[in-house]
Image: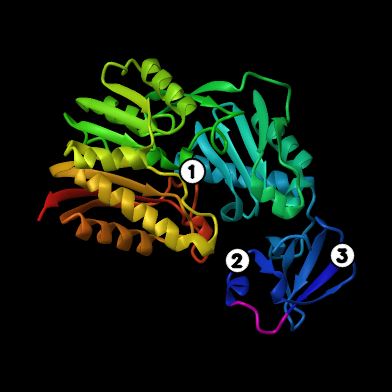
Amino acid sequence: MITVYLKKRIAPRIANGHPWIFANEVDRVAGAPAAGDLVEVHYADGKLAGIGYINPKSQILVRLLTRKRENIDDAFFRKRIAGAWAYRQKTGYTENCRLIFGEADQMPALIIDKFNDYFVLQTLALGMDKWKPAIVHALQDIFKPKGIYERNDVPVRNLEGLEQQKGFLSEPFDTNIIIRENGLQFHVDIANGQKTGYFLDQKDNRRAIQHIVKGAEVLGAFTYTGTFEIHAAHYGAKTVLGIDISEQAVAQANRNATLNKLDHICRFEAMNAFDVLKEWGKEEKKYDVVMLDPPAFTKSRENIQKAITGYKEINLRGMKLIRNGGFLVTSSCTNLVQPDLFLQTIDMAAKDARKRFRQVTFQAQASDHPIIWGMENTNYLKFLIVEVSDH
C-alpha cells in the first residue's frame, strides 16, 4: 500500500481523531497513488496514523477510514454499517433515521438515510464512491430493503472530480413514499426533494414545540414541506400559516396537511419570507408563535458575515411579529456558524428589536446525527425556543 507521511508540525486534530488530512499537512507521498486509492498514513516519526482514501484533486487529500492496520474490504463496510445500525437501535432511532452520518460514523463522505424500508445514499468523495457496490450489498444483506436510491446530485461532488447523478441502486420503485413521525404522516419525495427528500435531523425538535403552540396563532417561515407547522396544528394550535418561496414545497405541505386531516387549521402559501416578514412587521400583524427554519445561508467561510447578517435580519423581523409573551422558534443549519455565534446573533436581533427573551430550550440535531467533539461539521444544527417580551 502507498504511504503518506505527515509533516512534523501537523494540526493536533489529526492525532486527536479528526479524519481529514489536508494537502499542506503532508510531507511526502511514497509512490504514485491514483485518485480514490487506499493509502497508509504515518506520522513523521513513522507511527501509523491510519488508513484512508486519497484524492489529489480534493482540498482534503486523505480521509481516514480507520486508525489501525486492518483490511479495507466489503466486510469492513458491512461491519461499519452494522455497527451504526446497532447504535441507532440502542438510542431509539429505527423507523426513520440517518443510518450513516459521515465522519460521526467513521465513514467520511457517506450519508445514508433510512425511510422505513427505503434507503437513500450520498457518496460525496471519490474514495467512498468507489465502495458504493459494497455499501449497497451490505444494505441489502442487513435490511432486505424495498428500495435503494442515490441522491448524488450535489455540487460538492464536483470538487472531487465526480459527476452529479441520481437514480436507483436497486430495482426501481415508486419514489413518492409516506413516512410516520411523532404520530403524524408525511409525503417524502425521495427523487426530487431537498437533500435526501426529508430533514430527519429536526425530528426531536419538532416535538419540542408541543406545549408552546397550544391554542396559539402560529406563523412558520421557510416552511419547506410543512413539518413544523403540521406538528403545531397536531399539538393544538388555533391557526397555522406556513410560507415558503417554493411552489412545489408549498403544494407538498398542503398535501401533508390534508394527509393528517389538519388542513382546517393549517394552510401554506408560496411567498418570499424575507419580503413578507418585513411587510407584516410594518402592518403590525401579530402571532403568538413565529417559527423560522431557513436554509443554510452559506457553505463557505468567506460568506460567514453575510450569513450572520441574514440570520439577524430574519430573527429581528420574526420577533417584531410576536405578541408580548409569545415564542420564537428558530433554527440554523449552517455548520460554519457555530452555536455561540448563533446565540450572539439572536441576542443582537433582540436588542435591535427592543425585545427581551427567556430561553426555553437550546438543542442540536436528533441523536441519529451524533456529534463528535472536535469535529465542528458534526455539530451543525442549532434549534432555539425563546419567550419574547417587550422591554
- How crowded pointer 2 is (Cα within 10 Å; few <14, some 14-19, many 20+) is rated as many
- For the stretch drawn in magenta, what is the main secondary structure? loop
Residue 208 appearing in the image: no
Residue located 80% across and 50% down the image: 73
Instruction: Tell me where residue 305 appears, x and y as whole percent.
Output: 43, 63
Give the CA separation, mark 2 to mark 3. 22 Å
Say which residue label 2 marks. Answer: 18
The residue nearer to you, when weighing 90 against 292, is 292
| Circle 1: residue type | Lys
| Circle 2: residue type | His
> Do the residues under discs 2 and 3 have CB atoms within 8 angstroms?
no
Q: Is residue 63 magenta?
A: no
Instruction: Tell me where residue 339 appears, x and y as whole percent.
Output: 38, 60
Residue located 18% across and 54% down the image: 358
Q: Locate residue 263: give its quadrant.
A: top left
Q: Which of marks 2 and 1 is in front?
A: 2
From this view, report whether residue 141 is shown above or below residue 164. Answer: above
The residue nearer to you, when weighing 222 against 274, is 274
Say which residue label 3 marks. Answer: 1
- How crowded pointer 3 is (Cα within 10 Å; few <14, some 14-19, many 20+) is rated as few
Circle 1 — which element?
A: helix
Circle 2 — which element?
A: loop
| Circle 3: residue type | Met
Question: The magenta stretch spans which residues?
Answer: 7-11
